[in-house]
Image: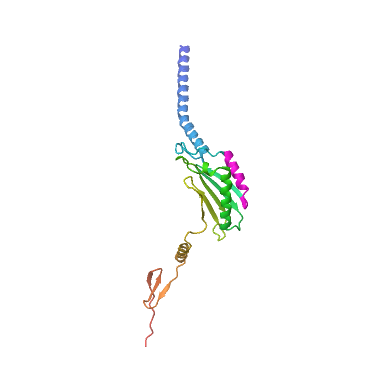
Amino acid sequence: MAQSRNRKTKKKSNRTARIFWICIILLVIPFAVLGWVLVSAALDTGSPILGDRYKGDLDPAITKSDLASVKSAAEGVSGVDKVDVNLATATLRVYADVADDATADTEKTVATDLYNAVTGVLSADTYFSQNDGKKMYDLEIHVYNLDKDRDSDAFAYVVETKTSSMSAPIQQVLSEPIDAELAQQLRDAVTARNNPTATPDASAGTTTLYGEEAQASPTATPAG
């Protein structure tokens, strides 16, 4: 009888242990899956998700070795102090820091020299031009003179761009407004709005503040 009771107790204990471990596994699996998703997302942060968007395009592809060669060539351009090269999805961007006193005209020359340096490594006809309907890379050359104080009048920023659908690159001075007169009018309007001034209107006995009229305080008239 004692042996029978021991066997039943042992069997019950084993069943309880199995149920316990099954419950533990069922609880752990969701957390393990969630952890894997989070780790995968963290590892993929900053990496473009291409899918089939460029299937059949971007051939030949720009490699890490190509990027190193582009950076080396760009660093050899006269007037360039520092260079960063970035390939995001289908756009190759070259950022060049030049002397703080460089003007927009100087930066235009540097941008052209950088374009020639990059396309000397990666042919514009091969890597930055569409062929037979195949999409290829876009190229952006960014040249600037100030890392900080970009609100300063001395700040100059030039971008030279060539998309794969363009036959030739174009330049734009981003630090200068396209319509200087309109830009000044907008700045003046903002300044006036932030610093309102009251204009008395003696004939109407009112004070005008940005088109709004406020009744002026009555002035006492002495008797006699």
- Identified at 47% across, 32% down, the residue is 33
Q: Which of 86 and 140 is in front in this view?
A: 140
Q: Nearer the viewer, residue 23 or 199?
A: 199
From the top left corner, tell me how far across and down residue 155 is, in percent. Answer: 56, 58
User: What colouring method underlies this structural image?
Assistant: rainbow
Image quadrant containing the C terminus? bottom left
Quick check: is 173 in the magenta stretch? no
Chief secondary structure of the magenta portion: helix
Q: Residue furthest bottom?
A: 224
Where does the magenta region start and end? 64-81
- Identified at 40% across, 71% down, the residue is 208
- Identified at 57% across, 39% down, the residue is 64
From the top left corner, tell me how far across and down residue 183 is, in percent. Answer: 47, 62
Q: In this view, does 199 lie to the left or right of 69?
A: left
Q: Which of 202 and 165 is in front in this view?
A: 165
Q: Nearer the viewer, residue 194 or 173?
A: 173
Image quadrant containing the N terminus? top left
**In the image, is residue 42 above or below residue 168?**
above
